[in-house]
Image (tube, rainbow, N blue to C red):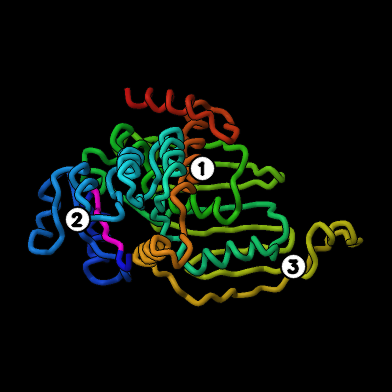
Amino acid sequence: MNKVRFGIVGVGVMGTGHAKSFLDGKVKDGVLSAVYDIEPTQTEWLKDTEVKIFNSTVDMFKSGEIDAVLVATPHYFHPPIALEAFSHKLHVLIEKPAGVYTQQVREMNEAAAKTDSIFGIMFQQRTNSVFQKMRQMVKDGELGEIKRTNWIITNWYRSQAYYNTGGWRATWKGEGGGVLLNQCPHNLDLWQWICGMPNKVTAFCHEGKWHNIEVEDDVTAYVEYPNGATGVFITSTADAPGTNRFEITGNKGRLVYENDKLEFMRLKQGEREFNEENKEMFGAPAHKRELIKTDGSFPAHPGLLAAFVDKILGRGEQIAKGEEGINGLMLSNAMHLSSWLGKTIPLPLDEELFLAELRKKYR
C-alpha cells in the first residue's frame, strides 16, 4: 500500500473541511474515496468528483473502496461507527470528543485493542508547536514538580443564533453537553496531556445561564492532583471579549501561554529550596523572564491526517492515539457529575453512576 483510501462518515461542517483537505492535496498519500451522510443533500457537492457516495455505512465499509474511516458525526455516534469499522478491519480516525460518556468510549477502546487497525482521534491542537513545547518542558523537568495549573478559556463567544442552527445542538440527547463537549475537548485533552490527570474534580456547571439552551454554557472547575498540586479550569461561551490564558506553576517557575506567546518566569533557585534557606522576612526567589521560542509550526487538521496516514503506512508515529480520547472526556464527565450531585468526584470516574445521571438529564 502506498496510498490510504479514506471514507468519511458525516459530511457536515467538520466532515466537509476534512474532505476538502483531501481533495486539495493537503494530505500526502491520503485519498478521499468515499463518503456517507444520513442527509443526502450534504453530499451533493461531491457528485461531480470521483468520490463515491454511499447510502449506508455498511455498504461503504463492505465495499473494498476504503482502507480507513474518518468519523465526523454528532458525538454519540463516534463509538458505534468506530466499532462497526473495526469489525470490517478498517483503520479509524474519529472527530473529538471520543464520545459522550466514558463507558461507551471504553468499549470502543477495548474493541480497538483487539484489532490490528490504527486508531486515532482528531486532537489537532497537539500539532501546535507551542503546546508541544509546553509538554516537553514539563516532561524534561524544567518547571520542577507542578504545584498549580490554571486555564481560563473563554474566547469562543457564541450568540443565541449559533445555538439555533441545529436541533441536536446544545441538548442532552443530541450533543450530550454544552461548552465542555463542544468547545472544550481540545483544551481538556491538552490540559491532561501536558500536566497529567488529576484525581479529584469539583465543578460548577451552569446550564442555560447565558443562552436559551438546556446544557452548560458557563463552567468553573477545581481539581487536585496525586502529588498535591491543584488546578482551576474556567470556560464560557458568553464572555466578550474572551480570554485564553494557560498557566503552569512549578517549583522552578511559571509557564504562561497567552496571545499565542509562551513565557517562562524561571526561578534562579527552586521555591522549595529557597523557602528552606531564606532568612529574610520578605525574601522571594529571584526570577528571569524568558520568551520561549518554537518553530511556529501548527499544521492542524491536515497535519494530524498526514501523521495518521504515515502511521498506517508504517513510517511514523501518531500524534493522538484514539484510546487517549477517554482522558479529556473523563474530566468533562466528572465536572458534569460533580455539578449535578454537588460534591467532589474522585477519578477514575464511576461510569455507571454518570450514565444514570445523564439519563436523568434526557428525561
Give percent across and percent down for residue 235.
46, 48
Which residue, given by chain and number where applicable, does mark 1 sit on? 220
Which residue, given by chain and number where applicable, does mark 2 sit on? 34
Which residue, given by chain and number where applicable, does mark 3 sit on? 267
Q: Residue at x 46, y 43 (%)?
A: 113
Label 2 sits on what residue type?
A: Ala
- Residue 73 located left or right of residue 40: right
Q: CA distance from mark 1 to mark 2?
A: 42 Å
Label 1 sits on what residue type?
A: Thr
In front: mark 3 or mark 1?
3
| Crowding near the residue tagged with mark 2, few <14, some 14–19, many ≥20 C-alpha atoms within 10 Å | many
Label 3 sits on what residue type?
A: Leu
Q: Residue at x 58, y 64 (%)?
A: 134
Q: Which residues are magenta?
A: 4-9
**SS category of the residue bearing label 1:** strand
Q: Residue at x 60, y 50 (%)?
A: 196
Q: Residue at x 21, y 55 (%)?
A: 65
Q: CA distance from mark 3 to mark 2?
A: 55 Å
**SS category of the residue bearing label 3:** strand
Q: Residue 173 versus residue 208: which sits nearer the camera?
A: 173
Q: Main secondary structure of the magenta part?
A: strand
Identify the mark nearer the N-term, 1 or 2.
Answer: 2
- Residue 190 located left or right of residue 359: right
Q: Residue 334 versus residue 116: which sits nearer the camera?
A: 116
Q: Residue 25 versus residue 223: which sits nearer the camera?
A: 25
| Crowding near the residue tagged with mark 1, few <14, some 14–19, many ≥20 C-alpha atoms within 10 Å | some
Residue 262 in view in this figure: yes
| Crowding near the residue tagged with mark 3, few <14, some 14–19, many ≥20 C-alpha atoms within 10 Å | many
Give percent across and percent down for residue 16.
22, 58
Q: Is residue 130 magenta?
A: no
Mark 3 vs 2: CB contact within 8 A: no
Give percent across and percent down for residue 145.
72, 55
